[in-house]
Amino acid sequence: MEEKEAAKRIQQLREEIRKHDRLYYEEAAPIISDREYDRLYKELVDLETQFPDLITPHSPTQRVGGKPLKAFEQVSHVIPMLSLDNTYSEEEVKNFHARIRRLLPNEKIPVVIEPKVDGVAVSLIYENGRLRQAATRGDGNVGDNITQNIRTIRSVPERLRDAAPKLLEVRGEVYMDRKGFEKLNDERKRQGLPLFANPRNVAAGSLKQLDPAIVAKRPLGVVFYGTGATEGLNVDVHSEIFPLLKKLGLPATERWWVAESVEEILDAIHELDGIRHNFVYQTDGAVVKVNSFAQRERLGFTAKSPRWAIAYKYAAERVETRLRDIVIQVGRTGILTPVAVLEPVLVSGSTVARATLHNEDEIKRKDIRVGDTVVIEKAGEVIPAVVTVVKSKRPRDAKPFDFARHIHGKCPICGDPIRRDPQFVAWRCENLQCPAQTTRRVEFFAARSALDIESVGGIVADKLVESGLIREPLDLFELKTEQLAKLNLGTDEAPRVFGEKNATKAIKAIERARTLSLSRWLFALAIPDVGKTTATQLAQFHDNIDDVAHSQLLLDVLEYHQKRDQKESAREIAERLIKAGFAERSKSKAEKDGIVTEVGPVVAQSVLDFFASTTGKKILRRLNELEIQPTSEKISAKKAAELPLAGKTFVLTGTLPSMTRKEARKKIEALGGHVSSSVSKKTHYVLAGTEPGSKFDKAKQLGVKIIDEAEFRKILPR
Ligand code: IVH
């Protein structure tokens, strides 16, 4: 073919492809099959390959073009991209309405109700009808320039149709439709890759790709709901924007309502709720916006959001599905949790295939049986749960679930005997070496709120334990980059290695974990009953892990509860705990002279038991060997080293003449010293007031220097 002839055919093909794109994406009325479309597309690609000089940046084939970027350029938004106030109650919608009426008295204030799209916010700028730039929201003022990525979305026109304004910034949300999401996950499953949690995450992740070729493979769409900076646009009410966007060839929100009274607004919100699941994109609410731009201007903004709009979020979505099976999962503390295996369904934007059933009693109470049709609920990031059983749909042969018989008194993973833990209405596997427990502990250990070891998530933890590379969380500190790089996260048939880059990153994060605070470490060790609050509390009153393991304070808590009937001894311990700041006097009349501690006897016992167990002792030993010594956050170690009392340990006892013990503690800590709860050979000073307790005797016995307040003041710098 001659170049001239080719140019003509190329022109034809481009026009034709654009027409079919429009019919397909904008009008949802394709007139040719996908196959025919692909044929046209391929013909164009072939011709352009033969005559590369004829390629123009606006050819439909160039949507996928562009080289991978090193980093995204940062671009400023001329008009900031703000967020909206969210509300979950109709009451607040009424309040919103009352507020705008109060601010604009005696005026008609028509509002628009439209879907709140659950995607990723983007801003596109068209100049003289040509797409010039696309950006993410970023922090609202500055975002990433993602023009290359947006160009790969077929429903985004490169050129606007009709008379386009000189400047048009459109704002909207990029999404992945349900079908595309399910297809993508099916494919990943086949390849043994981890599944995406929900369409929104994939859309967000896709836009963050530096290589547009990857983005081009993801079936993304976009829907616009408003404008930003504009020039030459003669519109003064929001409701006119939608038909205008459509006319220009931009996909826009498909349904909206104009209303004036509160009743009309709520009716629209309800109506939208009834139809929103039919949209191809996910929605999680309704946005109510004042229609007139002039009125919007007069209403203005608060620090964060406009006064002229509010977002109403719909309640958690509920759907029905079939319960295929009930399996038992072993958690990090050995608790056996029944989990519902479901026929996968999409709820609130993610595919749910499992839901927690909490415990045996819950299954009994709700009479949940395998084969049942169940209603499940999921809100945002919350773990999906089974709400009820649809009894009318129960198969005739469905039998009540017998938990005990199901597990035969054995841990389903390691086969060790299990014990019923009355406190948790749960069965517990007490084998701390149980692989299921180990895996969950490793995962927990590395989680963001624990030691924040990025890239050691569920699958990696599974594979690390399964491959025998680690047997307990602390083994992570002995991993080598090369070992980790070779770890197979896939299957034997479809292997997928962790890789050098990820491994280096993970090792770095592991090294960083060494220096994290005592509270994070206490939390990360997955001590039964120790949550974040307890870990923080313990860290505030102890210097290091050894100190917690042999804590006099915890022993006191236990002793206090054992000796509660023996008034005298109990009172003495109570006073000690109060003085240490570890307990407060109970305000309840029934419990005269009683105390309350944040860390109660059950937790205290659990902590001491843990460190006294073989596993606990081993942990202490290994921490020592690995030279990991998390210190209390009472002071940051670095700063403390330069302070006058750095490295000095104090123990306080008795009543001081002119300051409370809390004040003394604060003074010592502010100057870099430690206050410990118990006297040992390592104690530098025991600061004693009148009526000192047993610590005074212990100090004498050990030959620790005892000082009074006057001497203490002399130590303090002037
Ligand atoms: S209007 C000044 N309309 O929700 C705020 N936002 O929390 C203008 N969103 O950042 C936003 N659907 O990313 C608006 N129909 C809609 C929306 C919508 C989704 C997102 C958007 C915004 C966030 C607000």
Image: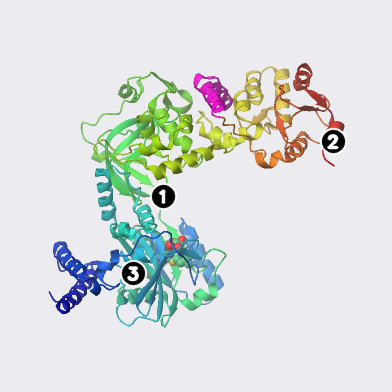
Residue 625, horizontal then vertical, whole percent: 55, 26
Name the side, left or right, on which 25 lies relative to 167: left
- On residue 304, the disc is none
Query: Quick check: 131 above or below 138?
Result: below
Label 3 SS: loop
Q: Nearer the viewer, mark 2 or mark 1?
A: 2
Residue 25 belongs to magenta span: no
Residue 402, horizontal then vertical, whole percent: 31, 25
Name the side, left or right, on which 620 lies relative to 194: right
Q: Amino acid at mark 1?
A: Gly
Residue at image location 35% in from the left, 53% down from the top: 202
Q: Is mark 2 within 8 Å of ligand 1?
A: no
Label 2 SS: helix
Q: Earlier in the sequence, mark 2 or mark 3?
A: 3
Q: Earlier in the sequence, mark 2 or mark 1?
A: 1
Magenta segment, which residues?
Answer: 602-626
